[in-house]
Image (cartoon, grey):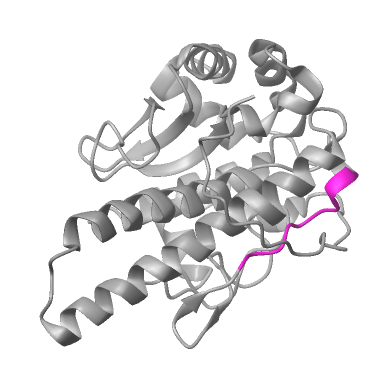
């Protein structure tokens, strides 16, 4: 098991006690059906300033913020999961979920806040002797924290969400079909070298969805791509149950994909593109 892919921070947080519910189909259909107009109707103005956070299944409530996390005095807090740690047993065991969220993701949060604080101190003192180190820390921990947020929000208990006809149509336009996208995504996840990720993202240039491999999560292959669906294939994400059977973990991941969240993120991303 790779123990060098994370920082040594061991801070923990309790498991979320949130429960899950069936997808809110009328709300989801309204969100999907209107494209950019629907985004405005749902209160999705400038990025980072929605009217409300999304619920556990994506486009619920009055708005959708794809990167909603608690903040206090400018510091990032650890986001809660929308389901208990044992809710994804069809794909990921409860212990792995607990360690992944409360220790690994928490380590990124601590590292991100620390890097931001150190760079603030450097600016205040006009002392940039260690700027290269702290910029590296900002990239590593910031990318790790944000991608883990996407990953955890991209999942829901098996059977609680399903891809809509609108999402299927979108995937057909860009990949030849939803199943074709899944095969491509799975192949990327199975074969990315070292500790990495497979990411379905929206590329504003050309208005297209693409699939990327990220061997180091702070080194994305293309700038400006908005993550819509992400799977963590670092060993800490699956080793307790699957050991070296990464492909089996990737196959089972599809059982717990939160399709409502994927749809909401896809439309949010397209709504950010200038008309």
Q: Is residue 33 visible?
A: yes
Counting from the top left corner in percent of width and height, residue 128 is at 13, 69
Hey, which quadrant is residue 254 in on the image? top right
Counting from the top left corner in percent of width and height, residue 207 is at 28, 38
Left or right: residue 102 versus residue 49 is right
Q: Quadrant of the N terminus?
A: top right
Q: Quadrant of the C terminus?
A: bottom left
* Nearer-the-camera pick, 257 or 131: 131
Q: Residue at x 65, y 15 (%)?
A: 246
Residue 125 drawn above or below residue 143: below
Q: Residue at x 73, y 35 (%)?
A: 162
Classified by dominant secondary structure, the portion drawn in magenta counts as loop
Residue 231 drawn above or below residue 126: above
Q: Residue at x 48, y 78 (%)?
A: 75
Left or right: residue 71 versus residue 114 is right
Q: Residue at x 71, y 20 (%)?
A: 249
Over which residues does the magenta segment extend? 78-86
Left or right: residue 240 versus residue 132 is right
Counting from the top left corner in percent of width and height, residue 32 is at 56, 49
């Amino acid at each position: 098991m790779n123990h060098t892919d994370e920082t040594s921070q061991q801070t923990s947080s309790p498991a979320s006690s949130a429960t899950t519910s069936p997808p809110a189909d009328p709300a989801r259909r309204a969100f999907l059906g209107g494209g950019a107009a629907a985004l405005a109707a749902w209160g999705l103005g400038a990025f980072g300033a929605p009217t409300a956070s999304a619920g556990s299944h994506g486009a619920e409530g009055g708005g959708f913020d794809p990167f909603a996390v608690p903040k206090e005095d400018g510091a990032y807090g650890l986001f809660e999961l929308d389901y208990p740690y044992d809710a994804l047993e069809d794909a990921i065991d409860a212990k792995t979920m607990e360690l992944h969220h409360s220790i690994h993701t928490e380590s990124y949060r601590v590292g991100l806040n620390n890097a931001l604080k150190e760079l603030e101190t450097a600016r205040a003192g006009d002392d940039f002797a260690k700027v290269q180190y702290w910029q590296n820390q900002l990239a590593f921990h910031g990318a790790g924290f944000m991608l883990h947020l996407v990953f955890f929000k991209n999942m829901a208990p098996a059977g609680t969400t399903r891809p809509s006809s609108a999402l299927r149509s979108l995937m057909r336009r860009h990949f030849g079909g939803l199943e074709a996208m899944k095969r491509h995504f799975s192949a990327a996840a199975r074969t990315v070298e070292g500790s990495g990720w497979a990411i379905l993202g929206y590329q504003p240039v050309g208005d297209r969805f693409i699939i990327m491999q990220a061997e180091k999560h702070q080194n994305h292959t293309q700038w400006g791509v908005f993550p819509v669906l992400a799977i963590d294939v670092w060993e800490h994400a699956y080793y307790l149950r699957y050991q070296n059977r990464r492909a089996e973990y990737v196959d089972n991941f599809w059982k717990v994909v939160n399709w409502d969240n994927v749809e909401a993120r896809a439309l949010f991303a397209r709504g950010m593109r200038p008309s």
